[in-house]
Image (cartoon, rainbow, N blue to C red):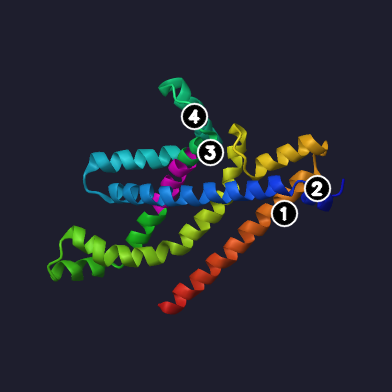
Amino acid sequence: MKILELLVEYRYYYIEGIKITIMLSFFSLIIGTTLGGILSLLRLSKFKPLKAVSTAYIELIRGTPMMVQIALVFFGSYALLDLDLDRFIAALIAVSLNSAAYVAEIIRSGIQSVDKGQWEASRSLGLSSSQTMRHVILPQAVKNILPALGNEFVTLIKETAVASTIGVLDLMHASKIVQSSSYTAFDPLVIVAALYFVITFSLSKLVGLLERRLSHSD
């Protein structure tokens, strides 16, 4: 069966796969950015125990495969907590925790990229450390890291393919359904690869446009 015929006949699975993939990536980025912001501030903290915990978490997550992390959350929630987690929720938790570690480093580098003179000027005006961070440093850091966060979203689109290993109905899982239904091993993978490319290429172009707009506004 030709690729176009497979795409038309099994379009429902591919459309649902695209929806799940984008939803999983988007919500993981939102949660990951929130947790990553907290982790980055902890890592920049002068309180050594908090800094050590944050550093250890980031290094542990970045040093282990996402596939292992998803399996640990999904099977571990039942084995350790006797919870029967929904497959999508388990993947969302694991991908969010994974993304948080990478976003923490993005935010930390964004904060550190702000000129130190901004700190000194703010303190000389009587602002406290927390006020300086909230009103002066973070707004500038956010502008610096927006393109990197966009690239993180693009990366998540591709990396969430491993969620199919626990049965999440994403694009990769859609290809498995089509493979078993059509008795065709190769063509469904070509379709999925093309769909991933279209999504990530389009998002990359949008991120590039955002980056150019931000550079012009400087």
Residue type at numbered disc 3: Phe
Mark 1 lies on residue: 194
Left or right of 95, for residue 4 = right
Residue type at numbered disc 4: Leu
Mark 2 lies on residue: 6
Q: Residue at x 56, y 55 (%)?
A: 154
Regarding mark 1 in the picture, which secondary structure is present there? Answer: helix
User: Which-is-in-front pick, marks 2 and 4?
Assistant: 2
| Sooner in the amino-acid sequence: mark 3 or mark 4 | 4
User: Which-is-in-front pick, marks 3 and 4?
Assistant: 3
Specify start and end residues of the magenta stretch as a single range: 94-105
> Where, quadrant-wise, is the N terminus in this rendering?
top right
Q: CA distance from mark 3 to mark 4?
A: 14 Å
Mark seen at residue 11: none
Q: CA distance from mark 4 to mark 1?
A: 30 Å
| Sooner in the amino-acid sequence: mark 4 or mark 1 | 4
Q: Residue at x 83, y 36 (%)?
A: 183
| Sooner in the amino-acid sequence: mark 2 or mark 3 | 2
Q: Do we see residue 63 in this rendering? A: no
User: Which-is-in-front pick, marks 1 and 3?
Assistant: 3
- Of 42 and 2, which appears nearest the observer? 2
Mark 3 lies on residue: 88
Report if the CB atoms under discs 1 and 3 are less than 8 Å apart. no
Q: Residue at x 58, y 61 (%)?
A: 203
Mark 4 lies on residue: 72
